[in-house]
Amino acid sequence: MSTSTQTVAVGGAGEAPPKGKAPLSEGARAERRLGWMLCAPAVIVMVAVTIFPIGYAIYLSLERYNLELPQDVKFIGLSNYAAVLSSPYWWQALKVTVIIAIFSVTITLVLGMLLAMVMHRTLFGRGTVRTAALIPYGIVTVAAAYGWQYAWTPSQGYLSAAFNNSAPLTYEWKAIAVIILAEIWKTTPFMGLLLLAGLSLVPEDLQKAAMVDGATGWQRFTKITLPLMKPAILVALLFRTLDSFRIFDNIYILTAGGNNTGSVSVLGFDNLFNALNLGIGSAISVLIFICVAIIAFLFIKGFGTAAPGTDIGKR
């Protein structure tokens, strides 16, 4: 009897204390309250501006609502979503959107990293170099798209003349390639600017210590620079992927969605403003919103450990 009692006592003493969050100190609670108070005005404005449009779009997506037949408005539930998801136009637009997003973001990331390193290492005329590099991003997207359209216009554009007066905007895959090229030209400076902020956080002492240890430039880049730049790379990839998935301006100006080059945003625009079908158009808008939310969740879930301070709880 005494043996069992001792065993229980020993077992109870050997148990690990239950895990749980440490209680916040009074100072930490005061800082948290102050943070919420400072964020409250912006949060209230954002909620007021976004909640009603999103809610109204969801409401319209559940109705059969065509402005040409205002007397025929009727609640039909998820029928609009079923119509969109069963339509080949949606899947074609989604395919084009994904292709443009993957290629433009990948190439922009590589070129943006090179641009960031050039701007970071420039010794003379650093301000001039950075200003010149950011010029494409400063141009309005519509104006830049018209420039690309003119450049590829046969017998007028210089790029078309350089390729024997070719007209790539009249072919599906060639037009998609031109759209991707226009996206890369326009957004590489933005990617470079975000990555430049990450480069500035990499300590030079680590680079010099690695050089003393005999590490090559590629080894220093892959073992020191890239790991320390993960938060900046996450932000840059997230912003650019979300922006690319919602691409509209370049496609609308260059091809207007013709020859199977329309994105999901162009498809939604056509249904809302050309066909005046608010039900189908709103359903497409809600699906785009869901896709963007899924992309953001996957990025944050997959690369969340790259965010500063996320490893504090593991120490």
Image (tube, grey):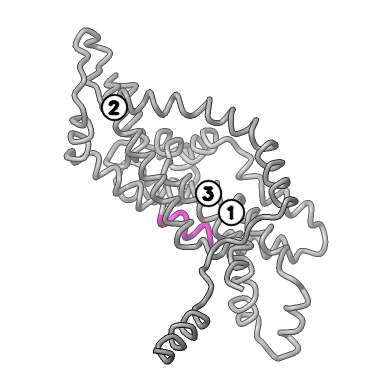
Quadrant for the N terminus in the image: bottom left
The numbered mark, 3 or 1, whose residue comes first in the sequence reads 1
The numbered mark, 2 or 1, whose residue comes first in the sequence reads 2
Residue at numbered disc 3: 239
Q: Secondary structure at mark 2?
A: helix
Q: Amino acid at mark 2?
A: Ser
Q: Is residue 170 above or below residue 122?
A: above
Mark 1 burial class by Cα count in 10 Å: few <14, some 14-19, many 20+: many
Specify the principal SS of the magenta part.
helix
Residue at numbered disc 2: 61
Let me know if residue 33 is in the magenta part.
no
Looking at the rendering, the stretch of residues picked out in magenta corresponds to 102-110
Q: Is residue 171 above or below residue 270?
A: below
Residue at numbered disc 1: 191
Q: Amino acid at mark 1?
A: Met
Q: Amino acid at mark 3?
A: Phe
Q: Is residue 270 above or below residue 164?
A: above
Q: Looking at this view, is 232 or 155 the one in front?
A: 232
Describe residue 34's horizontal placement relative to residue 305 as left or right.
right
Mark 3 burial class by Cα count in 10 Å: few <14, some 14-19, many 20+: some
Give the foreground label among 3 and 1. 3
Give the foreground label among 2 and 1. 2
